[in-house]
């Protein structure tokens, strides 16, 4: 049975959420604080932001664990709290999904270590892999739906993260996203075509999609995604020669500016709506935002993608051959039949039969905090 993410990707574009750090900063969290530690220290704030993205229409919600690897946490003296931060990050996202009353996919966010690997740099690749394995192991243990290895500056580091995922026993799909500069190359000079050539080899080993995130803005990410799609054969999922591999795009809201002490991103929700349509039309399968984007950007992209889908469906019906199967007429059953269907079953219920004859135990269940009754119903079934 195919994983739910793969089934949905085969049907059309999915919408991922946007920035977490941007919203935390807007709510007064200093930029030099450890955003990941808020999963433990202020989980209600992180949950509020997850809920905002779900209500805005996101299909995929990322855990607040982008920098929750040993190397990044070391700067805050939190390297020994990584496991707890990652576990709690998944819990907070799942609780937001439950409260929202709408099923979404929870993506375990895995960002770069901030170190340059040897031989170009001085950090041992084995140490980087171990840090990724530690983080990914916790995300998988708590039950993410997919891994999102994102904002990778180099293919070497991305491949260490992939190796760590395999060593951790990853059994969920993986999305790999690189970050590109304004010359549309990664920070160490890899082109979109080189990224496809290297990462395509991992398609049969868990990688479901590759793409670009962060970077300089929607225009450049769209250009990189189009180049990746061409390198894969031009069709969503590739050219059919080998495992299916989809393409993604989650750009920043442009270059940030400092305005009177505030960090401002210039790209509007309307601009992102156009980006979402363009990427979907090109064959992209995961659309979203990165730094500077907000639930308003997500809401605009949701509307744009829904409109694009409707237009495609109308065009498909319009272009259907004339000898297509005729529509099926559906008529309501006679009134007497409908009334009989509404009648209670003959005879007393099981509860009525027991009352007055044997001891009956009743259990009161508190109503759910959100709109999703699934957990309540599961508990009721366990009591039978």
Image (cartoon, rainbow, N blue to C red):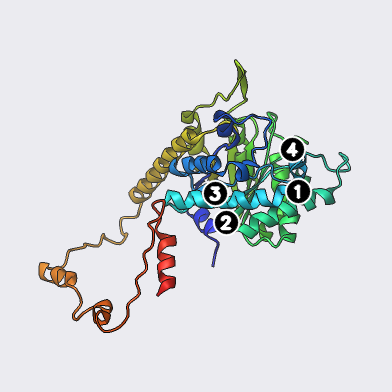
Other residues around mark 1 within 10 Å, as few (<14) / some (14–19) / many (≥20): few
Tell me the SS state at disc 2. loop
Q: Quadrant of the C terminus?
A: bottom left
Between residue 339 and residue 380, name the one nearer to us. Answer: 380
**x 72%, y 35%: residue:** 185
For mark 2, what is the residue? 145
Q: Residue 203: image x %, image y %?
A: 67, 56
Whether residue 97 is visible: yes
Q: CA distance from mark 4 to mark 2?
A: 29 Å
Between residue 274 and residue 27, name the one nearer to us. Answer: 27
Q: CA distance from mark 3 to mark 4?
A: 23 Å
Whether residue 283 is visible: no
For mark 3, what is the residue? 93
For mark 4, what is the residue? 76
Q: Residue 339: image x %, image y %?
A: 13, 69
Q: CA distance from mark 1 to mark 4?
A: 11 Å
Other residues around mark 4 within 10 Å, as few (<14) / some (14–19) / many (≥20): few
Residue 77 lies in what quarter of the image?
top right
For mark 1, what is the residue? 80
Q: CA distance from mark 3 to mark 1?
A: 22 Å
Q: CA distance from mark 2 to mark 1?
A: 25 Å
């Amino acid at each position: 049975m195919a994983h739910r993410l793969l089934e949905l990707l085969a049907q059309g574009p999915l919408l991922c959420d946007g920035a977490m750090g941007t919203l935390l900063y807007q709510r007064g969290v200093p930029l030099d604080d450890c955003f990941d530690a808020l999963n433990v220290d202020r989980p209600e704030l992180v949950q509020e932001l997850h809920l905002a993205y779900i209500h805005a229409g996101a299909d995929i919600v990322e855990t607040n664990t982008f920098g929750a690897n040993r190397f990044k946490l070391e700067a805050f003296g939190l390297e020994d709290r990584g496991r707890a931060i990652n576990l709690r990050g998944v819990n907070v996202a799942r609780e937001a999904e439950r409260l929202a009353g709408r099923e979404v996919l929870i993506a375990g966010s895995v960002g770069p270590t901030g170190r340059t690997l040897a031989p170009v740099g001085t950090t041992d690749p084995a140490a980087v892999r171990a840090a990724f394995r530690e983080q990914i192991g916790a995300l998988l243990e708590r039950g993410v739906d997919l891994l999102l290895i994102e904002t990778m500056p180099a293919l070497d580091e991305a491949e260490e993260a992939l190796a760590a995922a395999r060593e951790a026993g990853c059994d969920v799909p993986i999305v790999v996203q690189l970050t590109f500069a304004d010359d549309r190359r990664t920070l160490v000079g890899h082109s979109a075509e080189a990224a496809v050539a290297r990462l395509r080899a991992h398609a049969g080993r868990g990688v479901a999609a590759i793409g670009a995130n962060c970077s300089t803005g929607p225009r450049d990410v769209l250009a990189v995604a189009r180049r990746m799609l061409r390198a894969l054969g031009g069709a969503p999922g590739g050219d059919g020669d080998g495992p299916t591999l989809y393409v993604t795009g989650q750009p920043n809201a442009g270059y940030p500016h400092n305005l009177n002490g505030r960090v401002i991103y210039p790209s509007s929700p309307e601009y992102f709506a156009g980006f979402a349509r363009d990427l979907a039309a090109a064959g992209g399968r995961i659309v979203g935002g990165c730094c500077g984007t907000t639930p308003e950007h997500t809401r605009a992209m949701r509307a744009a993608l829904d409109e694009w889908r409707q237009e495609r469906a109308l065009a498909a019906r319009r272009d259907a051959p004339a000898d297509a199967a005729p529509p099926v007429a559906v008529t309501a059953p006679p009134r007497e039949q409908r009334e009989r269907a509404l009648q209670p079953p003959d005879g007393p219920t099981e509860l009525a039969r027991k009352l007055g004859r044997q001891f009956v135990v009743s259990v009161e269940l508190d109503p759910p905090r959100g709109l999703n009754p699934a957990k309540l119903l599961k508990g009721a079934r366990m009591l039978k």
